[in-house]
Amino acid sequence: MMPALTLGIEEEYLLIDPETRDLVPDPSPDFMKDCKDRLGERVTPEFLKCQVEIGTPVCTDINDARNHLTALRSVIINTAEKHGMKLMAASTHPFAQWGRQKHTAAPRYDLLDADMGGAIRRMLICGMHVHAGIEDKEMRIDILNQARYFLPLLLALSTSSPFWGGHDMEMRCSRLGIFDSMPRTGIPDRYESWSEYERMIERLVNAGVMEDSTKLWWDMRPSARFPTLEMRITDVCTRIEDALCIAALYQSILRMLARIKQKNMRWRIYPRIMLEENRWRAQRYGCTKSMIDLGRGECLPFASLIEEVLEMIAEDATALGCVKEVQHARTVLKRGTSACRQVETFKKARDDGADEPEAYIQVVDMLVRETAADLPESA
């Protein structure tokens, strides 16, 4: 049977001081209280106080996801403005310093701080996670193994972290380089069965290095709480239409893999080192250069690889009702990801005579505008 492939989207945002354009290291507790009053469990604090996370309910399709994600972003933007702040959807802040941030006082975060030390305190980064419902555990593991191939492609389309601590990192995604200092990250290994996966978790738990599978921070993982396969590799997208494109691509890719499984076919499993090479190229170049076509064994322009993916998932996007959303990938390529636009904004400001601090401020202003750009006028 085909999996349900219901959707859930989680996004992490940054809180901005409208005067300095720096982060707000210690927002008023009333901000989160007001968010909770309006959204309940759909909004949660993050490890750092300057961050906030939202999560949609289970969505039947991409249109349902669009409605919920639009509403959630709108409420957080409006609530932040009520408390004298702005909201920014980007995976790093252009110039904020991680050492100046404060972590949220809560037992879970206190434990993480004690366990991870400086590694967790440096996590001034935001991501987007997409859950897709796959009820059968064995199918979940089988599709996990195959879908790893596509993770760098999704990352390349989402990049929004070219700057870090006031430096141009000359990377489209600097977020993963920071996140990889944590344990149990990266592209997961291949597992022959659900029972093999569970045995691995049991051994790590019994060894005392983690409490449960929520401490697996892979680029994709079976959710510990829901019957879903959770994609975690992507940066948070500044524009909401780009986020919906990523979610629709992910959902369609999983359906394609489930569909060919019904015909006793499967996507070829490649060595992890080859997948990691494409992951690195996505971090370094985003969608601006080439990636390895692992079947051909040669680098091809990113645009041609995406066109191949769009062709192979056309049937699935149609069945899922997300053709417009997956084809938005072409718009992302033409317009550039958030990272591309941040770099362009910075360079233009410098060419126009701005010093570095002023150029970074212009980048923040652009990000704040684009975070709300695709929301309805009534939001």
Image (tube, rainbow, N blue to C red):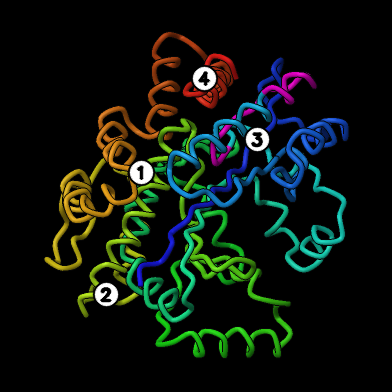
Look at mark 1 in the image and give the residue it sits on.
157
What residue lies at 81% left-to-right and 43% top-to-bottom?
102
Gap in Å between the C-alphas at discs 1 and 3?
20 Å
Gap in Å between the C-alphas at discs 2 and 1?
26 Å
Q: Residues within 10 Å of mark 3 (few under 14, many from 20)?
A: many
Q: How crowded is mark 1: few (under 14 residues within 10 Å), some or many (20 or more)?
A: many
Decide: is 10 above or below 223. above
The region drawn magenta spans: 78-92
103 vs 289, left or right, is right
Q: Which marked residue is nearer to the observer: mark 3 or mark 2?
A: 2
Q: Residue 376 carries which label?
A: 4
Three-letter residue code for mark 3: Leu
286 vs 50, left or right, is left
Decide: is 368 above or below 276. above
Q: Do the residues labelled 4 and 1 touch (CB within 8 Å)?
A: no
Q: Is mark 4 on a helix, strand or loop?
A: loop
User: Is residue 159 inside the magenta stretch?
Assistant: no
Three-letter residue code for mark 4: Pro
Q: Pick whichever of labels 4 and 1 is earlier in the sequence.
A: 1
Q: Residues within 10 Å of mark 4 (few under 14, many from 20)?
A: few
Q: Which marked residue is nearer to the observer: mark 4 or mark 1?
A: 4
State the residue in front, 20 or 259: 259
Three-letter residue code for mark 1: Leu
Q: Pick whichever of labels 1 and 3 is earlier in the sequence.
A: 3
Q: What element carries label 3?
A: strand
Look at mark 3 in the image and give the residue it sits on.
14
Gap in Å between the C-alphas at discs 2 and 4?
40 Å
Q: Are marks 4 and 3 in contact (CB under 8 Å)?
A: no
Look at mark 2 in the image and give the residue it sits on.
261
Q: Are marks 3 and 2 in contact (CB under 8 Å)?
A: no
Three-letter residue code for mark 2: Lys
